Image: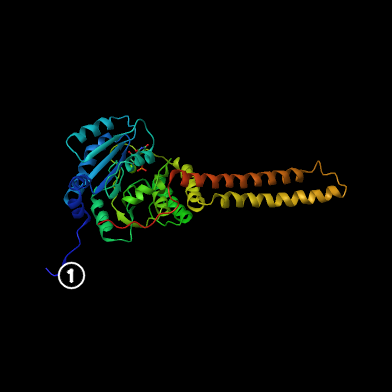
Amino acid sequence: MAAGNTRPPTMLQMLEIAHPEALALAEAQPEVSVVIPVYNEVDNLTELVGRVHDALAPTGRSFELILIDDGSRDGSAAMLERLAVQRPWLRPVLLARNYGQSSALQAGFDRVQGRYVVTLDGDLQNDPLDIPAMLDRLDSDDSVDMISGWRRQRQDKALSRRLPSVIANRLISRATSVHLHDYGCALKAYRRHVIDRIHLYGELHRFIPSLAQDAGARIAEVPVRHHARTRGQSKYGIDRTFRVILDLVLVVFFMRYRQRPLHAFGALGLWLATPGVAILGWLAVLKLGGDDIGGRPLLIAGVMLLLMGVQLVVAGLVGELLIRIYHEGRGSPQYHTREPLAR
Ligand code: UDP
Ligand code: MG
């Protein structure tokens, strides 16, 4: 064989030569980790597990399916344990109570072993048959770290579901500058480092693309299938609207000002304190001129503005201390570098 044709040994081949026992461990690790949160979905589980298996097995990729029971009361946990008996690739995680979809997802993310991570809902509305194409795209397209599903033909109620979602998608896209048609689609595929960099609290699962882009991920959106829910009930109603708006404020603050809270709080503080100082200065001049300013409403306004302004600047300074403790105390960097693509 000509010297030019010899390929350098792969990482696994080098590992085999140096540490045969480590190779066994590396091989035991699945390539793909599928993460699904489950809350009262007992009637969907058997079919769900079957469909994920049938979608992934033909691809020849090794995989694990991490199903997180989020404190279900309908026997989902027992069902998961039964299903896991014959299936070594199925790893149930049983949470002690209902924590919500974001925490359930995070519980899964904390346990993933694969180099690709896929999420979907446990109600069979997403179609596992879309997963292989997403993984192929991650294989072939180095310019993408995360693929987000787009339910082009969404099978949910128009007024209570699709309309609020259209508005939310526009609003979130504009506010965060991460432009997607469908923030609400749970079916997503990630390179592992993206998952390692984000932390979900509250109900932030709806903002994963924004959080991921903030962590340096490059995102693509692909159309995926969507089915109507045939069994079990949706866990959310229209009441989520206000929570989404508040979370949007949080995410925008996080994306723009996390590294410089003084600029957010301090700017507001200066906007308030400046007219406060002007008012108080003006009243001081009047006072020196012999006026009685004690009963003037403007005095109260001036004092309030100055006080609020100073407090906001101080809040910004405290924020600056906190961000330093966050990064330096926990050793988490304030930036990420591009990950080399492991092949
Ligand atoms: N879910 C969860 N914990 C909760 C609520 C929901 O793990 O507290 C799961 C649920 O079982 C499903 C997914 O999150 O797998 C999405 O929930 P759902 O289908 O009710 O939301 P929708 O599609 O109606 O927005
Ligand atoms: Mg659903």
Q: Position of residue 317 (x, y in %)?
A: 58, 47
Which is nearer the eye, 129 or 96? 96
Q: Amino acid at mark 1?
A: Gly
Q: Residue at x 21, y 32 (%)?
A: 82
Q: Residue at x 35, y 47 (%)?
A: 196
Left or right: residue 164 versus residue 318 is left
Indicate how the structure is coloured in the image.
Answer: rainbow
Which is nearer the eye, 113 or 140? 113
Q: Is residue 247 visible?
A: no
Residue matched to label 1: 4
32 versus 88 height, above or below = below
Left or right: residue 314 versus residue 332 is right
Q: Residue at x 18, y 70 (%)?
A: 4
Near mark 1 (Cα within 10 A), the count class, few <14, some 14-19 or many ≥20, is few
SS label for mark 1: helix
Screen quadrant of the N terminus: bottom left
Q: Position of residue 244 (x, y in %)?
A: 46, 45
Screen quadrant of the C terminus: bottom left
Q: Residue furthest right?
A: 290
Which is nearer the eye, 67 or 18? 18
Left or right: residue 93 versus residue 20 is right
169 versus 46 height, above or below = below
